[in-house]
Image: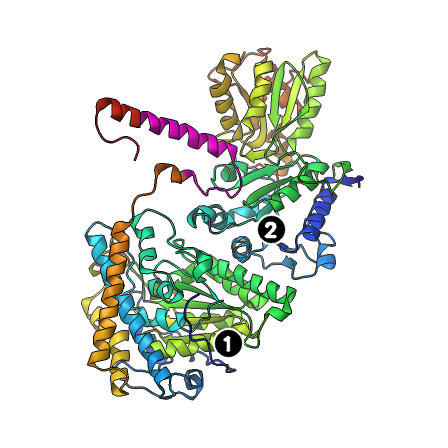
Amino acid sequence: MTQTLTLAKALNAGLRRAMADDPTVMLLGEDIGRLGGVYRVTDGLQEQFGPRRVVDTPLAESGILGTAVGLAYRGYRPVVEIQFDGFVYVAFDQIVSQLAKMHKRTEGAVTLPVTIRIPVAGGIGAAEHHSESPEAYFAHTAGLRVVSVANPQDAATVLRQAIACDDPVVFFEPKRRYHLKGEVDPDVDLTLAEPMDAARVVAPGDDVTLVTFGSLVGTALDAAVAASDEGISVEVIDLRSLSPIDHARVEASVRRTGRLVVVHEGPRHVGLGAEIAATITERCFEFLEAAPVRVTGHDVPYPPARLESHQVPDLDRILDGVDRVLGRVAVPAGSTTGSTTGSTTGVGA
Amino acid sequence: MPDTMGDAPREDLPQAGATTVRETSTNETTQEQTDTAVRLVDAKGVRHPDPELDRWLTDVDAGTDEADATLLRLYSDMVTARRLDTEATALQRQGELALWPPLLGQEAAQVGSARAMRGDDFVFSSYREHAVALVRGVTPAQLTPVWRGVTASGWDPYTVGMATPQVIIGAQTLHAVGYGLGVLADAERDPGSVGDDGTAAVVTYFGDGAISQGDVSEALVFAATWSVPVIFFCQNNQWAISEPVRLQSPVALADRAAGFGMPGVQVDGNDVLAVLAVTRAALHRARTGGGPTLIEAVTYRMGPHTTADDPTRYRDAEEVASWADRDPIERFGAWLRTRGTLDDEAERRVREEADAVAAELRAGCIATEDPPALQVFENVYATPHAALDAERDTYAAYLATLVADAADAGTHGGAR
């Protein structure tokens, strides 16, 4: 039944449904039990399903992931909460060397259906290590699937799909959008739902293809509206899956628009924008009217809260990227793909 | 499922002796810690009674034919393990294996602990536990493919109750905790599935080097917190490649257990009978809700870290010789002869069986063929993955051009 829920509540509803559907689903994390998680995503679940299935862990992320590997080895379907993006790195070996490789290592004998929920990205004025976009690390790792949700309905449905998937899935939650409200049916039939690894056109357009995911989908939609005021038709694609990437959906769009802008919060260097721009260039070079443009975070450690507005692409920077791919502004000397700095601000604002 | 001896039901577990911090140089190993370790058969093959531990050995002390058979099997396991180890080392020298990590010297620690387990128990080991694998039911031919470089695992973990070798130091200890948590969850979901002898248990093997890894500390914390049925079996073989155990810890490794809130036992790892007894005791505790135990089996890596290592660069011949005097097989054999369990005829049979198993290992190893090229794309994901399928197809098409080129040129070669 459809109800109006915030993205965080939709995640809660998705978890509740997944746990009700499958008695092997277990939740592990810090503060997820009595407290219900620092963002309340697991609120009420321990009360409903008991402390054996909603487990407060000691404060050790590698321990949490390693425990999840062992639980899955035994036949369970663990869903792990990493409290904040910057805390996941101490679990890197268990994710990259253990979780991602075990199915291959054992020639398929062992499957590890582990879901790792990670609140990601910035824009909330947080302390250091609470605003990071680590998607490239995980998307680079064979054996993992990586997804990112941008709206409440996907929060519920894709989370259930991730939990039901027999592969390990890194599930990114845009913490800046936890309070975003929308109509949600937490009980949709997963056999009828759009596949988890399919990108989605969230606003149709003809002039420019704008690809993004997670917390910036909303900003990209705002940019499309602003651009339309100037007579520019922007097609916005929510990638949803970051590994694998639905290049076919992007390619189909670029073949019509001839122009590609990729937007993400994570640093530009070896980020997802590079992969998408390269792949689209390989696949439909002759359809491109301009070199792809990337609008991304800078290649710096995530800055303190008072400076984060310079790190996270905003409406103006996205519109600047749209202008540049349309050849409406001069590309600064020395740049081959266009600058993402503030040197061309003002355009489209 | 592997043969097991099970564990006689007893209550308490002997605790580690009070080992104090010793004044030592950083290069000194902790071999004298064996003086505080529990021991039943000494280096001269003399059996010493121990009221605590003997309670766990009533079956092997019975003086029956069954008891003799059990003891002979422990002996045979160790002889076979050493013989296999020698064969595999030779195979590496002959170019059939890329690498081999010898277990030489650690036979008693591995056989004694593995023989204490039940078939429904599960093992998460490191990469040197060849004797444990044999006892669990891994075939000799399944031991070598990993080290030949044709696969990352030689067996199906679920058919033998043992995960495949873990190369990342200490990572497997957390997997054991998770598996054990699953055992507890199973028991709670289906209480009727738990028999009078308790739940299954998990044994995780790691070394003295691993004790410094964060994962091992985290595993000890998690296991103690949740009272998970896990045995942390640390083979302290004194050396982590070139680093002596003193570099990892100024105190006995077993003494760490107290800080985590679990019993710690230091056992003479070259005394198979003592290892069997302490592991049985710890397993019983784990099965019946008593939680985890840390066992430190004090032993010695008589050989190199791997066939690529040269231990003469970092340790003295005198030290190696002193440990040779405490050899686990000679010691146990001497005691078996004293009690009349082992004679020349039995010895000959044991050696013949070991030779046969070694021949099986050699034949299996040499017969192992390289997998087809496209196997690199298999089992990366458990569910369909169109992008990887496309990548595989592209590479297959490329390989086909090599075959065509080779055919055109009238030569062999191309796709391997």
Position of residue B152 relative to residue B27, above or below, is above
The answer to whether the residues at label 2 and label 1 have Cβ atoms under 8 Å apart is no
Label 1 amino acid? Answer: His
Q: For mark 2, name the chain.
A: A
The residue located at (34%, 87%) in the rendering is: B48
Position of residue B25 relative to residue A83, above or below, is below
Quarter of the image with the N terminus of chain A is top right
Residue B50 visible? The answer is: yes
Q: Quadrant of residue B289?
A: bottom right
The residue located at (63%, 38%) in the rendering is: A305
The residue located at (44%, 73%) in the rendering is: B255
Residue B98 visible? The answer is: no
Looking at the rendered structure, the secondary structure element under dot 1 is helix
**Residue pointed to by mark 1:** B284
Foreground of the two, B99 or B247:
B99
**Residue A44: x, y in percent?**
74, 54
Foreground of the two, B358 or A267:
B358
The answer to whether residue B385 is magenta is yes
Label 2 amino acid? Answer: Val
Q: How is the image coloured?
A: rainbow
**Residue pointed to by mark 2:** A80
Query: Could you tell me what secondary structure mostly forms the magenta stretch?
Result: helix
Q: For mark 1, name the chain.
A: B
**Residue A279: x, y in percent?**
49, 24
Label 1 neighbour load within 10 Å: few <14, some 14-19, many 20+: many
Which tag is nearer the camera, tag 2 or tag 1? 1
Q: Which stretch did the figure color magenta?
A: B377-402
**Residue A121: x, y in percent?**
61, 37
Q: How far apart are the two marked residues, 2 and 1, measured between alpha carbons?
A: 31 Å
